Image (cartoon, coloured by chain):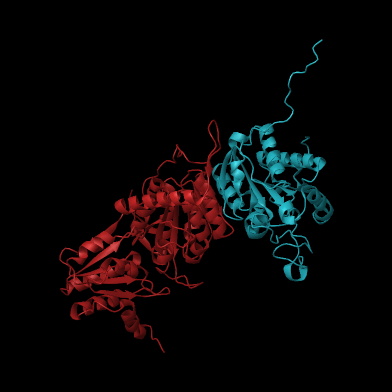
Chain colours: A cyan, B red
Amino acid sequence: MDTTLSAQIVYQRPQSLTEATMHYCPGCTHGIAHRLIAEVMDEMGIRERSIGVAPVGCSVFAYNYFDCDFVEAAHGRAPAMATGIKRLLPDRIVFTYQGDGDLASIGMGEIVHAAGRGENISVFFINNAIYGMTSGQMAPTTLPGQKTTSSPRGRDVETMGYPLRMAELLANLDGAGYVVRRSLHDPKNIRMAKKAIRLAFETQLRGLGFSMVELLSTCSTNWGLSPLESLKWLEEHMIPYYPIGDFKVADALKEIKL
Amino acid sequence: MAKELLKGNIAMAEAAIRAGLEGYFGYPITPQTELLEWMSERMPALGRAFLQAESEVAAINMLYGAACTGARVMTSSSSPGISLMMEGLSYIAGTEVPVVIIDVVRGGPGLGNIAPSQGDYNQIVHGGGHGDYHPIVLAPASVQEAIDLVVLAFDLAEKYRTIVFVMADGNIGQMMEPAELPPMRPIKSEYPHWAVRGAMGRERRILSSIYIDPKDEEVTNYRLMQVWNQIQANEVRYREYFLEDADTVVIGFGTAGRIALSAVRAARAEGIKVGLLRPITLSPFPAPQIENLIQRVKGFLVVEMNAGQMLDDVLKVVKGRVPVEFYGRMGGMVPFPDEILAEIQRMSREDIPLDGDPRQRWMKRLAPVIHWQN
């Protein structure tokens, strides 16, 4: 009896990702977010009609990693640029990939109005509570008391204001079809995040309006923690302030079983 | 097509539509708002994209995205709105995608007012956004010319993958004149090799203004400069009036040029040998034409509705070889033909010095005109 098993592939690079080596730091969850989006693009067969819009921030080079058409926006303007593309090409799948400085600070106007218009685009929002690319300054999502290079004694809400809960904020708008928050800190939450990414694209395909998945993420380098400590810090500090949940789900999406 | 009585803003909007415009993104601002309103009615009726953006910042970035699809797209605004668009303009220039922008210039700086002005010359012609780039800038002096230049703007933008401005002023935008619109061109059916429209059966495409390695950015800058050299060699446009025997030449563009023409005609009636050079492309600037005139004229009079922004470009060409005088009105004030006629008469009587600063001399002459109290 032959006891050797034939090789079986159980895990491989999604077709929607290129073979480029990612530049992200060890312990960073951008790579997981990229992979999840690419897996969903593969499963839905939308790679060839997708157009991505990259932000300014750590994921500024996102276009190197997705094997689909891409443009690179000015800081915070990805939703406006995506709007321009989607209005000219309504049958394409248009998505932005933005960090917290990009989306919740400099791009606040563009994201609120894209959601308010019910712009049929999907937004993947990486919230790691810090500016990564410029090496660790305070973000609009930095937690109260959190130390950064521009809040060295911790974020004092008396002078620096309070963190912004973007998913809750945007879910209030009538134009939003699907707005949820997920986390990338453990396998269960990563699986939940993938389903949410799928539902965001389904929202767009069905013309149900603006969709956004906020993804709680880590920044080991600028948090000054090991990758493992970072995952724990996210769970213990970020989730209490930024609860995981569905803040807006259009009725037509509720019948989709994944 | 027959001539109709058309308002400048609406004529420019309809001209763009007939040139095959596929997408318009804009924000209301006086004195260009009729253009946006016309688009809001016509574009959806034709099944084309129209969107009133939440700001000029958003409008220019929507335009940027739309331009990446290779479609004919445009925005319009007026001076303060154009200031807000400078970020997006630099990105568009760096990405080398074609766009058309109409600027119906108003009085400034700051909120200023809604009267006609040419105060955006430097911001548009000499940059505004960061980095080295040169848009083409077209300056109409009538509603008919505005129509013709809007159509030309799209062709030039696509030919050179560049930004083309139509720099009108509140006068051109608001004035009604008989003019003829072009026939409706079909929407293009083929899109350029760089357009981002989804990677269907082909390699993916990326449009970006990032060249993270300075060596690559330098090569990109070199390419932009080479295109600019071609534009300078091939696209200079201007109109000449009474230049054959002129010993004094007025240089003015847009509305100021048109008013200057009235003054030149009146001076001719008095026997003064004066002509007019009206630049139509402010960028590329008709420097070679001015250079040719230096050989045979006694002096130039530059007339603008600003404090002498084009004057500096004229002085750069003339280099002190013949006298240059300046006359401008600012802040939304429009000169009367008589004011310019008086300048022409003075130049025909007096010896104008080669040295000194024409702007300082003009300020002294202007002070009593504006009742300046020191």
Residue visible at 41% across and 69% down? B117
From the top left corner, tell me how far across and down residue A180 is, in percent. Answer: 76, 48
Q: In the displayed structure, does residue B248 sit left or right of residue A86?
A: left
> Relative to the observer, which residue lies in front, B227 or A212?
B227
Judge whether A113 appears above or below B207 on screen: below
Which quarter of the figure has residue B105?
bottom left
Residue B289, quarter of the rendered image: bottom left
Residue A102 image offset from top left, x and y in percent: 64, 55
A38 to the left or right of B102: right
Is residue A110 among what the camera can see? yes
The quarter in which the C terminus of chain B is drawn is: bottom left
Camera-side residue: A133 or B193? A133
**Residue B241 at x, y percent in the picture:** 22, 63
Residue A33 locus on image (x, y percent)? 70, 43
Question: Of B34 and A222, which appears nearest the observer?
Answer: A222
Describe residue B335's horizontal placement relative to residue A258 as left or right.
left
Is B343 left or right of A9, judged from the image as shown?
left
Is there any visible trace of residue B85 in the rendered image? no
Relative to residue B113, is residue A135 depicted above or below?
above
Which residue is outermost to the bottom? B374
Total marks placed: 0
